[in-house]
Image (tube, helix red, strand yellow):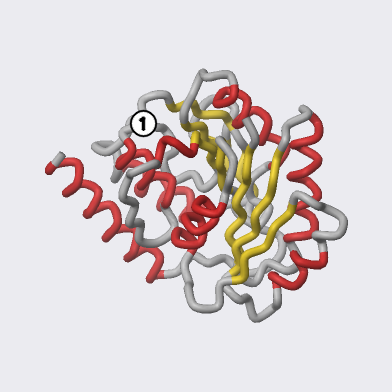
């Protein structure tokens, strides 16, 4: 099974060269046939141009520059739609997720042990570095808020892989950043495997977390509860 990793970006020019190198290093370390698709929302810092300049070095790197759309979740879904591989995944562009864990997430899907895998901060050997107490508490509250939707320990994770067939004919309409939660709930996936990761706060660029993002999350969760009740 070939794999496509989608990286949604907005003003991540400093991070992309480092991340792309680490991703392909991870694929090659286990002889995985992996592709990378960067979906950029026409970043003012020209992240898309930085990514295009990397294509000469990385033939399996593709870039989609979106000039008429905005939003992480829609960027991920556009990337998934473009992918021509059996396995698809997503990772944040800010180097907060450890690319070296990619083989551990992809292999269970290739072996048929899982249909969906995710990097989890909240299982044994997982964790978070350099977060203030306030942010840790808000993350825990956000996780507790969806206990009625999924048994996954870290449904907020933005680092995950899945069989592309899992979302075939599944209507996805995420609002905000939590596309993984949307897929878990609407696909009714049963074979989920969590892999421990240590989440590290970004070194370059600015966080996208804002009051609007929090509001979008609350709206998104409310809609998923309604969906769960009706189905």
> In the rendered image, is residue 121 in sight?
no
- Residue 69 picture location, percent across and down: 48, 73
- Using the rendered view, name the quadrant where residue 46 is placed: bottom right
Task: Give the residue displayed 48% in from the left and 49% down from the top.
Answer: 136
- Residue 129 picture location, percent across and down: 63, 45
> In the rendered image, is residue 151 in sight?
yes
Outermost front residue: 84
- Using the rendered view, name the quadrant where residue 104 is placed: top right
Query: Observer-nearest residue: 33 or 209?
Result: 33
- Residue 37 picture location, percent across and down: 65, 54
Quarter of the picture containing the C terminus is top left
Image vertical order of residue 13 relative to residue 7, above or below = below
Task: Give the residue displayed 50% in from the left and 59% down from the top.
Answer: 78
Q: Which residue is mark 1?
A: 189
Q: Secondary structure at mark 1?
A: loop
Query: Observer-nearest residue: 8 or 144?
Result: 8
């Amino acid at each position: 099974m070939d794999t496509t990793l989608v990286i949604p970006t907005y003003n991540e020019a400093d991070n992309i060269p480092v991340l792309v190198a680490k991703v392909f290093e991870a694929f090659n370390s286990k002889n995985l046939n992996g592709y990378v698709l960067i979906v950029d929302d026409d970043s003012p810092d020209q992240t898309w141009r930085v990514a295009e300049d990397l294509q000469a070095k990385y033939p399996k790197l593709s870039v989609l520059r979106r000039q008429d759309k905005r939003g992480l979740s829609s960027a991920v879904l556009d990337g998934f739609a473009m992918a021509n591989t059996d396995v698809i995944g997503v990772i944040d562009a800010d180097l907060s997720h450890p690319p070296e864990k990619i083989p551990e997430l992809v292999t269970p899907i290739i072996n048929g042990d899982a249909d969906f895998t995710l990097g989890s901060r909240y299982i044994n050997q997982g964790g978070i570095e350099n977060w203030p107490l306030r942010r840790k508490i808000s993350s825990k509250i956000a996780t507790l808020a969806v206990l009625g939707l999924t048994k996954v320990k870290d449904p907020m994770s933005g680092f995950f892989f899945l069989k592309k067939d899992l979302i075939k004919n599944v209507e996805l309409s995420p609002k905000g950043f939590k596309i993984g939660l949307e897929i878990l709930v609407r696909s009714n996936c049963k074979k989920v495997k969590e892999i421990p990761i240590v989440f590290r706060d970004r070194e370059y660029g600015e966080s996208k977390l804002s009051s609007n993002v929090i509001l979008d999350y609350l709206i998104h969760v409310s809609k998923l509860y309604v969906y769960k009740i009706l189905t």
